[in-house]
Image: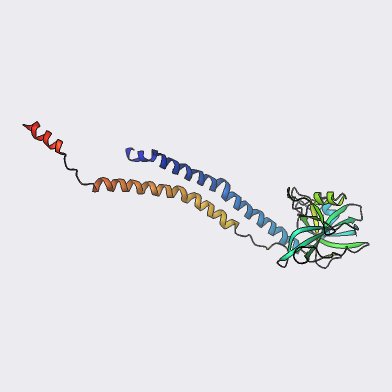
């Protein structure tokens, strides 16, 4: 045990604490974070894939809870009419790699409930200003769309009015309800965020639809496994350095030449014998 007393030195104790803290973070925070993102991405991809194959249901079934618990990405149909002068633009969007806006509007169902609808993307003018956005068609309409979950709001990005349009930074049913001064019914999505409708291509009043996410799991599984590997490698690396230090100390003891006696020791030895 005396050979290991060097581990009680401050430098070794600090190194051991750092390694233990790093391994703990890898196993309890970093790896679960990436693996959780992988699970949620795979779940989202499965919902999208299922929705592509499924026939659309009426949005009233979703609103009334008759379409299952997970309704985001489901294709739905709705009948009603667009609310006049309900256009809201979402800033900081991109269309074909260039700056653009998402165009929102309110859609009143035949039963009186009003939903938020994303009409799609339009390109900005000179990369800085919104183009002339035509109003959605008037009168009764039948539309097909996908259910999407609200994005939430950014606290320091408040709604504004510029270039003759009400503008926001995210698609959020509650925020847009306040901006429009109209009660918008959030669509149940199976999450804690009320949803809205994203118009399909070719529908009345639609612009270019926001593209669906790519159906791949991304690098999250690989990242999660890497963090697990790092969590294992850190204590193994510490063990390697401990063994290396023990070997170096053993080598120093065996290779050290015998020390010459000092003059005092030689004199003491001579006169002591006499």
Figure label count: 0
Q: Residue at x 39, y 49 (%)?
A: 240
From what the image shows, is residue 245 above or below residue 136? above
Find residue 87 and report its horizontal and vertical position in percent.
85, 58
Q: Is residue 103 left or right of residue 273?
A: right
Q: Is residue 13 left or right of residue 3?
A: right
Q: Residue at x 66, y 54 (%)?
A: 40
Find residue 82 and report its horizontal and vertical position in percent.
89, 59
Q: Nearer the viewer, residue 121 or 75?
A: 121
Find residue 80 and report its horizontal and vertical position in percent.
91, 58
Quarter of the figure with residue 88: bottom right
From what the image shows, is residue 117 above or below residue 235? below
Q: Nearer the viewer, residue 46 or 272?
A: 272
Q: Is residue 50 left or right of residue 25?
A: right
Quarter of the figure with residue 133: bottom right
Q: Is residue 79 left or right of residue 68?
A: right
């Amino acid at each position: 045990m005396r050979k290991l007393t060097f581990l009680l030195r401050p430098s070794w104790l600090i190194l051991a604490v750092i390694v233990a803290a790093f391994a703990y973070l890898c196993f309890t925070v970093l790896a679960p974070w990436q693996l959780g993102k992988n699970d949620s991405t795979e779940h989202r991809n499965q919902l999208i894939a299922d929705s592509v194959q499924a026939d659309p249901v009426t949005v009233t079934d979703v609103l009334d809870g008759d379409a299952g618990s997970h309704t985001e990405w489901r294709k739905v149909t709705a009948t009603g009419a667009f609310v006049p002068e309900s256009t809201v633009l979402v800033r900081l969007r991109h269309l074909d790699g260039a700056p653009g806006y998402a165009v929102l509007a309110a859609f009143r169902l035949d039963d009186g409930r009003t939903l938020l609808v994303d009409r799609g993307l339009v390109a900005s003018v000179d990369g800085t200003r919104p183009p002339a956005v035509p109003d959605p068609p008037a009168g009764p309409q039948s539309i097909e769309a996908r259910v999407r979950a609200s994005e939430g709001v950014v606290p320091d990005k408040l709604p504004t009015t510029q270039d003759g349009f009400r503008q926001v930074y995210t698609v959020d049913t509650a925020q847009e309800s306040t901006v429009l001064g109209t009660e918008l019914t959030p669509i149940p999505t199976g999450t804690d965020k009320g949803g809205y409708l994203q118009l399909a291509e070719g529908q009345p009043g639609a612009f270019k639809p926001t593209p669906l996410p790519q159906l791949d799991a991304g690098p999250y599984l690989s990242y999660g496994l890497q963090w697990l590997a790092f969590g294992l490698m850190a204590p193994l690396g510490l063990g390697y350095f401990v063994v290396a230090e023990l070997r170096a100390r053993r080598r120093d003891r065996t290779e050290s030449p015998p020390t010459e006696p000092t003059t005092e020791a030689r004199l003491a030895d001579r006169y002591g014998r006499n």
